[in-house]
């Protein structure tokens, strides 16, 4: 798996669009192999064979794209039209993931700085933003956002990257009017994924005037209806009551538990399904990412705010906050609690 990630990271670190696209497809293929069920007769050997051939398959497809005017591997010279693709494999259940060796290996690798996929993806997003807005670049940004969401769901401790101002600013920059509605909508979903169960990230979002960014986009007449619907959903999510971290981790265990996991408001279902006890120790770089911006202490403490406090913050930028809160109390979306 390290070889696959190394190839993908080499492409993601490029400034060349086709190479970045290749790297994103390699990461997507790796995550698909982890998340999707294998055929009944394939077995583990078939799974690892598909994984090991993923990088070379992507290279062949890209070469065909160049040689055949973008037709790709489906238009090899003189080749007949391919048969319809098979139906996609169903996703694995959490129990299946917990017993999957590939997922266990992937999760372990994500605990360190060198192989953390989320970190490479947000750095790729940073370079893509510097290139400006155009059609091909927008597609790369959308693909990178989708993968960031997926990695945070597979490895919740990676959310701690967004407790750092530089990475949270990337998401806020993508909510600027310069970007197309598809990117804005995908960014809102990514932002929710980064904030849920991560009070420290929420505090960073607030400190960077994230509420002003969101409400300004919502009030703008140029904002599309679909984006406004996503923003309303985000505001409902933001106003949900926060829960402090579960007190199950005693002081005796805190030294062995990864810092990125301790600051979550409640353990994710994926973390509970994962068979490891302490999930391993993070590298010093990953642990530093969990520290609050500007804080000299590396201690991990769940910093939550009450619904009334968040209502007051949002009320500085939006008039109808009380109506949103009343609707929340009546309907209790998201199960009534964020965490």
Image (spheres, rainbow, N blue to C red):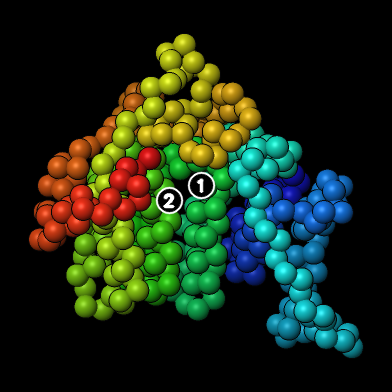
- Is residue 166 visible to the viewer in this orientation of the structure? no
The residue at 67%/58% (across/down) is: 90
The reply to whether callout 2 and callout 1 are in contact (CB within 8 Å) is yes
Of 58 and 150, nearer the camera is 150
The residue at 31%/57% (across/down) is: 234
Q: Residue 165 carries which label?
A: none
The quadrant holding residue 12 is bottom right
Q: Which mark is residue 193?
A: 2
Circle 1 residue: 152
Furthest residue to the front?
330
Q: Position of 163 compared to 222: left or right?
A: right
**Local SS, label 2:** helix
- CA separation in Å, label 2 and label 1: 7 Å
The residue at 31%/60% (across/down) is: 233
The residue at 87%/54% (across/down) is: 41
Q: Position of residue 163 (x, y in %)?
A: 38, 41
Task: Name above or below for residue 256 compared with residue 149.
Answer: above
Q: Position of 313 compared to 335: left or right?
A: left
Q: In which quarter of the image is the N terminus?
A: top right
């Amino acid at each position: 798996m390290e070889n696959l990630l190394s190839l993908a990271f080499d492409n993601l670190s490029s400034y060349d669009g086709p190479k970045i696209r290749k790297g994103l497809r390699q990461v997507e293929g790796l995550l698909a192999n982890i998340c999707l069920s294998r055929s009944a007769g394939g077995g583990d050997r078939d799974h690892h064979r598909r994984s090991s051939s993923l990088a070379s398959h992507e290279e062949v497809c890209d070469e065909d794209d160049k040689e055949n005017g973008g037709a790709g591997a489906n238009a090899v010279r003189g080749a007949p039209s391919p048969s319809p693709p098979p139906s996609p494999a169903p996703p694995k259940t959490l129990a299946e993931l917990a017993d999957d060796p590939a997922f266990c290996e992937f999760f372990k690798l994500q605990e360190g700085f060198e192989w953390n996929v989320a970190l490479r993806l947000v750095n790729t997003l940073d370079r893509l933003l510097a290139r400006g807005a155009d059609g091909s670049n927008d597609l790369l940004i959308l693909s990178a956002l989708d993968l960031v969401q997926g990695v945070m769901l597979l490895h919740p401790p990676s959310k701690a990257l967004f407790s750092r101002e530089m990475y949270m600013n990337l998401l806020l920059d993508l909510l600027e009017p310069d970007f197309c509605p598809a990117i804005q909508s995908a960014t809102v979903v990514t932002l929710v994924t980064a904030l849920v169960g991560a009070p420290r990230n929420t505090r960073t979002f607030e400190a960077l005037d994230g509420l002003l960014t969101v409400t300004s986009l919502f009030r703008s007449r140029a904002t599309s209806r679909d984006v406004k619907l996503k923003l309303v959903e985000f505001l409902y999510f933001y106003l949900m009551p926060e829960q402090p971290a579960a007190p199950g981790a005693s002081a005796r265990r805190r030294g062995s538990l990864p810092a990125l996991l301790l600051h979550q408001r409640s353990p994710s279902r994926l973390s509970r399904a994962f068979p490891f006890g302490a999930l391993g120790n993070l590298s010093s770089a990953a642990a530093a990412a969990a520290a609050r911006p500007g804080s000299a202490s590396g201690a991990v403490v769940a910093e939550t705010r009450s619904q009334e406090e968040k209502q007051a913050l949002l009320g500085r930028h939006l008039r109808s906050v009380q109506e949103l809160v009343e609707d929340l109390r009546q309907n209790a979306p998201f199960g009534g609690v964020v965490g």
